[in-house]
Image (cartoon, coloured by chain):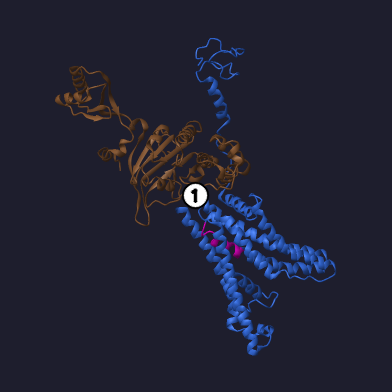
């Protein structure tokens, strides 16, 4: 599996399907490709994110299709993949009666790092995530934010080329979320490690990711770069400082369908758009209203999940 | 800040308003973030390094985890409290060897046989050791839900219980063999002449083998039972109850059979040995400890009389039951962690 540029992509899946013995379908024909960088894996709880990660780690066998990580088949070469991948689970997974240094050193060794190197790497990983003197204390005494950092540090300890982070901001307060997201962005940018961040919080993922994969009910909603997710839409957003209701009536009188959105009006653009712009400007001028905003609206990532029509259209299958 | 400041050096101006970020950044070539940015940059530059060196293979990772488990079986790498019980248990088991060395130095014979050692003491201490330390080895990881961190490492799901088993077997082996070696050391020190030393050595070897048998079976039973729950106290209870119930059952059966044999007029328990009834032969099959005795007897070891199954021609059955028990426990342990890897 070698694309033109030589190096295999970080992750590729081909019609990946997972049906649990009970008959629950967690993933259904998921085909995605993850490039280097930070990728958001977004979906509501139960959308199949954790199942997807378990398959990538080679811990679950897919019921159909295949997944490859750095070109290694997840089902056949799980051990090789786990050597290249660091995993941060969603839930609590830290023994309270061990110090962070001990734990991260031990888990580094479990990743195959020799003893002395594992010790150095543990200290470094913990420093990178912002734990300094605290790292000698027992983990039981840590705050939730510190524990999340230890979980991230243990994933780094094995010197991975890819990090799989499952809901890394879980349980954190707003400030904690921000610093965790900053940390993730920094690891992606400066450490040269590819990252997949699974989250149900779009607003967060949006901030740190280059790419986005949206899944729902085990199926791909959409996979693209963040930019294209938020690209220009075929909608004009008009805001006037007063007289919004009058303007709406006026525009509808001129044959445009305008609907209110917060304090603004949304007008679908027809044709190449010039005609719509002109009609809107004419309408505003006719009423003599103070125009404060007239722009093409950008898609919000949230719309993916709110707007069912759009979901159908974007469903790549 | 000082984006276009004409004098970048300007060191001796502490009062300079707005430009007093970092004192030593004289060479900063006019980037807005220079003062704070370079401070953070230093950390980053020291910072992340990948690792391209050699990695341990799966076998070495298992060895490392086994060693880790071995150490934690004795509370090593844990707090002082965790070391108390294993230390007391080991000392208790070594006491008879010390007493023996003392009496032998006073000219007496060796009091204790290697394979039986001091049966009741060893049964009791090993029960306690396994019941308390097996949960230390497996239940903690279940309780703190750390298993996913192991399973996401380059090992297979079966490797985790394998390493735990190897480590804990090693710990049980230390508990069994160290007292025996102490006994041997004390005996050899008080023996005179090569033939006496050779006799001690020949007596020691079956003892060491008995220790090995105990260790590999008790570790498997202990870990399987302890791995059913993450609550340590509960896990200890499960292991202890299993040992006590089966032990008591087997002892009661043995006592009944021995007593019946006497009452039936077949004479003393000693003659019962020569012609054991079927019930007598099978009564020891219900507890690991009487199974050990049975197998030991099958190999023609020391008979300590009371409380030991009269295996008669059933010796092989004892060995088979013991092997089935061991295999069952190991299979259960594997299945338990295979399931855990998927959840």
State the residue lying farthest toward the front: A242
| Residue A127: image location, x then y, percent | 57, 35
Residue ID at (54%, 62%): B225
| Residue B315: image location, x then y, percent | 61, 76
| Residue A54: image location, x then y, percent | 44, 48
| Residue B163: image location, x then y, percent | 58, 55
Residue A35 visible in the picture: no
Q: Does the segment drawn in magenta span residue B165?
A: no
Q: Is mark 1 on a helix, strand or loop?
A: helix
Main SS, magenta residues: helix
**Closer to us: A303 or A313:** A303
Q: In which quarter of the image is residue B164?
A: bottom right
Residue B8 visible in the picture: yes
| Crowding at mark 1 (Cα within 10 Å: few <14, some 14-19, many 20+) | many
**Closer to us: B252 or B74:** B252
State the residue lying farthest toward the bottom: B265
Residue ID at (64%, 82%): B258
**Closer to us: B122 or A105:** B122
Q: In which quarter of the image is residue B171?
A: bottom right
Residue ID at (52%, 54%): B142
Instruction: Determine whether, in the image, residue B293 is placed left or right of residue A283.
Output: right
Q: Mark 1 points at which residue?
A: B148
The chain displayed blue equals B
State the residue lying farthest toward the top: B6
- Chain A colour? brown
Q: Quadrant of residue B27?
A: top right
Read off the chain for label 1: B
**Boundaries of the magenta span:** B216-229
Q: Is residue A67 above or below residue A226?
A: below
Q: Does the segment drawn in magenta span residue B225?
A: yes
């Amino acid at each position: 599996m070698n694309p033109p540029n030589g190096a295999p992509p970080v992750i590729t899946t081909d019609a990946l399907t997972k049906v649990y013995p009970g008959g629950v379908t967690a993933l259904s024909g998921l085909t995605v490709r993850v490039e280097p960088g930070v990728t958001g894996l977004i979906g509501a709880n139960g959308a199949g994110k954790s199942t997807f990660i378990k398959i990538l780690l080679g811990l679950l066998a897919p019921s159909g299709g295949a997944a490859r990580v750095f070109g290694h088949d997840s089902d056949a070469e799980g051990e090789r993949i786990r050597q290249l991948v660091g995993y941060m689970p969603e839930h609590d997974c830290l023994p309270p009666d061990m110090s962070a240094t001990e734990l991260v050193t031990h888990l580094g060794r479990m990743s195959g790092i020799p003893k002395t190197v594992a010790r150095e790497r543990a200290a470094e990983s913990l420093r990178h995530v912002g734990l300094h003197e605290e790292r000698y204390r027992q983990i039981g005494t840590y705050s939730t934010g510190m524990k999340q950092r230890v979980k991230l540090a243990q994933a780094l300890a094995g010197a991975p080329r890819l990090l799989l982070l499952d809901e890394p901001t879980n349980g954190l307060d707003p400030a904690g979320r921000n610093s965790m997201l900053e940390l993730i962005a920094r690891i992606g940018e400066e450490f040269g490690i590819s990252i997949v961040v699974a989250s149900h919080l779009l607003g967060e993922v949006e901030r740190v990711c280059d790419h986005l994969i949206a899944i729902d009910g085990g199926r791909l909603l959409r996979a693209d770069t963040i930019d294209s997710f938020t690209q220009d839409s075929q909608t004009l957003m008009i805001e006037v400082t007063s007289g919004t209701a009058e303007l709406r009536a006026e525009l509808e009188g001129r044959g445009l369908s305008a609907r209110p959105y917060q304090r603004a009006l949304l007008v679908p653009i027809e044709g190449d758009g010039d005609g719509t712009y002109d009609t809107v400007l004419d309408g505003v001028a006719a009423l003599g209203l103070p125009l404060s905003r007239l722009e093409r609206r950008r898609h919000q990532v949230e719309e993916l999940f709110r707007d069912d029509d759009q979901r159908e259209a974007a469903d790549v299958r | 800040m000082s984006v276009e400041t004409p004098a970048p050096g300007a060191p001796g101006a502490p009062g300079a308003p707005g430009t007093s970020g970092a004192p030593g950044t004289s060479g900063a070539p006019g980037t807005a973030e220079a003062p704070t940015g370079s401070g953070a940059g230093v950390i980053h530059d020291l910072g992340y390094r990948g690792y391209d060196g050699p990695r341990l293979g799966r076998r070495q990772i298992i060895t490392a985890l086994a060693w880790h488990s071995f150490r934690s079986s004795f509370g090593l790498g844990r707090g002082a409290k965790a070391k108390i019980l294993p230390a007391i248990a080991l000392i208790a088991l070594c006491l008879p060897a010390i007493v023996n060395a003392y009496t032998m130095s006073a000219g007496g014979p060796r009091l204790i046989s290697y394979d039986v050692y001091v049966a009741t003491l060893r049964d009791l201490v090993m029960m306690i050791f396994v019941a308390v330390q097996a949960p230390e080895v497996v239940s903690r990881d279940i309780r703190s839900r750390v298993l996913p961190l192991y399973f996401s490492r380059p090992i297979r799901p079966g490797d985790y219980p394998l390493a735990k088993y190897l480590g804990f077997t090693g710990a049980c082996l230390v508990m069994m063999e160290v007292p025996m070696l102490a006994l041997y050391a004390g005996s050899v020190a008080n023996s005179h002449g090569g033939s006496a030393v050779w006799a001690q050595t020949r007596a020691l070897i079956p003892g060491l083998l008995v220790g090995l048998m105990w260790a590999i079976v008790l570790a498997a039973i202990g870990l399987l039972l302890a791995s059913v729950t993450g609550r340590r106290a509960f896990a200890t209870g499960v292991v202890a109850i299993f040992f006590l119930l089966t032990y008591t059952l087997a002892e009661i059966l043995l006592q009944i059979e021995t007593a019946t044999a006497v009452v039936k007029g077949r004479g003393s328990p000693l003659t019962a040995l020569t012609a054991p009834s079927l019930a007598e032969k099978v009564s020891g099959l219900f507890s690991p400890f009487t199974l050990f005795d049975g197998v030991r007897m099958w190999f023609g070891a020391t008979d300590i009389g009371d409380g030991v199954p009269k295996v008669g021609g059933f010796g092989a059955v004892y060995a088979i039951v013991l092997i089935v028990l061991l295999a069952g426990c190991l299979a259960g342990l594997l299945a338990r962690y295979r399931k855990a890897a998927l959840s």
